[in-house]
Amino acid sequence: MTRTAIVTGAARGIGAATALRLAQDGYAVAAVDLSAESCAETVAAIEAAGGRALAVGADVADSAAVSAAVDRVAEELGAPTILVNNAGILRDNLLFKMTDDDWDAVMAVHLRGAFLMTRAVQKHQVEAGWGRIVNLSSTSALGNRGQANYAAAKAGMQGFTKTLAIELGRYGVTANAIAPGFIVTDMTRATAERIGVTFEDFVGHMAKEAAVGRAGVPEDIAAAASYFCSEEAGFVSGQVLYVAGGPKA
Ligand code: NAP
C-alpha cells in the first residue's frame, strides 16, 4: 500500500528536500505551499525521480483553505497519513521594535498553521489506525536575540508535538519534532541580509560554531524526518530531535 504524505512549505528549502526524500522513501507526496505554482519545481523533481506528487496551493493559517487542501489530497493521492508541518516565516526584530503584526504573522503560520493542518489530517490517520506527524521546531526555541515571536512559536511547536503524541498514540499515530540548527536556505539567506553580512560570511561563521564544522543542509533535516515517518520509528513519539551539528544550539 502506498501511503500519502503532506509536506507544508514544500516550495523550497527544508520542505522541498523533505518532500523529495519522502517520495524517494516510496510515499505519494502532496507539496503544499502558498501557491501551487511555487511547488512546480518540487513536483517536477519528484516525478523525474519516478515518484508521485501533487502541488497544492494553500495558506496553512487559513482554516477553509486547509480543509480544502486536505480533502483534495485525499481525493487525488489517497488519505494522507503522514504530515510534516514545515511552513514557516521570520519576522525578526528586537522586542521593543516588534510590531503586533510581526508577532501575529509568526504565530499564525507556525502554530495556527500546524494546528489547522494537524486537525484536518488526524481524521485520516485515526481512520487508518496509523500516522506520522513531524513538526519543525528550531534551536531558537531555547531563546534567540531578535526572535521573541519565533522562539515562542518554535517552543510552542514542542508542547504541541508532545500533546499530539499523548492524544493520538492510541490510534497508531506518532508525533515528533525536529529542531534544526543553522540550515542553508532562503530563510537564513534573508537573515544574513537583514543583519548586513554576506551569506558566505554568515555560513562560514555558523560552520565554525557547529561541532561538526559545517553548516546544515536541507537534506540533513529531510533524513531525520524520513526516520520519524518510517515504520520502524513506531515506538518513538513526543520527542524533540535537535539536528544542529552538535550538542549545543
Ligand atoms: P524557507 O526556505 O523560507 O521556506 C519556507 C516555505 O514555507 C516557503 O516556501 C514559504 O512560502 C512557505 N510558507 C510561508 N508561509 C506559508 C503559509 N502561510 N502557508 C504555506 N506555506 C507557507 O524556510 P526553511 O529555511 O526551509 O525553513 C523551513 C522550516 O524549518 C520553517 O518552519 C523554519 O522555521 C524551520 N527552521 C529553519 C531553520 C534554518 O536554519 N533554515 C532552522 C530552524 C528551523 P513563500 O516563499 O511564498 O513565503
Image (cartoon, rainbow, N blue to C red):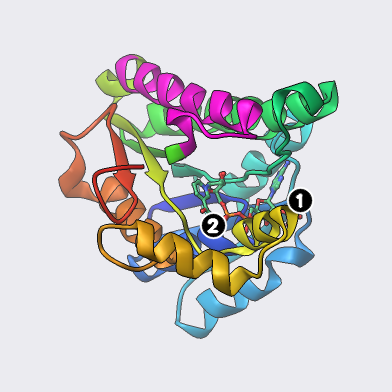
Task: Please say if 243 is above or below 215.
Answer: above
Nearest the viewer among 189 and 133 is 189
Question: Which residue appears farthest toward the bottom when viewing the image?
Answer: 48
Task: Please say if 212 is above or below 172.
Answer: below
Locate residue 149, reporting x and y percent: 65, 27
The residue under the point 19% across, 38% down is 234
Q: Quadrant of the N terminus?
A: bottom left
Residue 238: which quarter of the image?
Answer: top left
Q: Main secondary structure of the magenta part?
A: helix
Q: Is mark 1 within 8 Å of ligand 1?
A: yes
Q: Label 2 is placed on what type of residue?
A: Gly
Nearest the viewer among 161 and 74 is 161
Task: Please say if 79 is above or below 164.
Answer: below
Q: Quadrant of the C terminus?
A: top left
Locate residue 134, reporting x and y percent: 41, 40
Q: Secondary structure at mark 1?
A: loop
Identify the magenta region. Answer: 140-166
Question: Is 107 within the magenta?
Answer: no
**Circle 2 residues within 10 Å: few <14, some 14–19, many ≥20:** many
The residue under the point 78% across, 30% down is 102
The residue under the point 60% across, 49% down is 73
**Which mark is on residue 45?**
none
Q: Is mark 2 within 8 Å of ligand 1?
A: yes
Q: Which residue is mark 1?
A: 34
**Circle 1 residues within 10 Å: few <14, some 14–19, many ≥20:** some
Q: Label 1 is placed on what type of residue?
A: Leu
Q: Which residue is mark 2?
A: 15
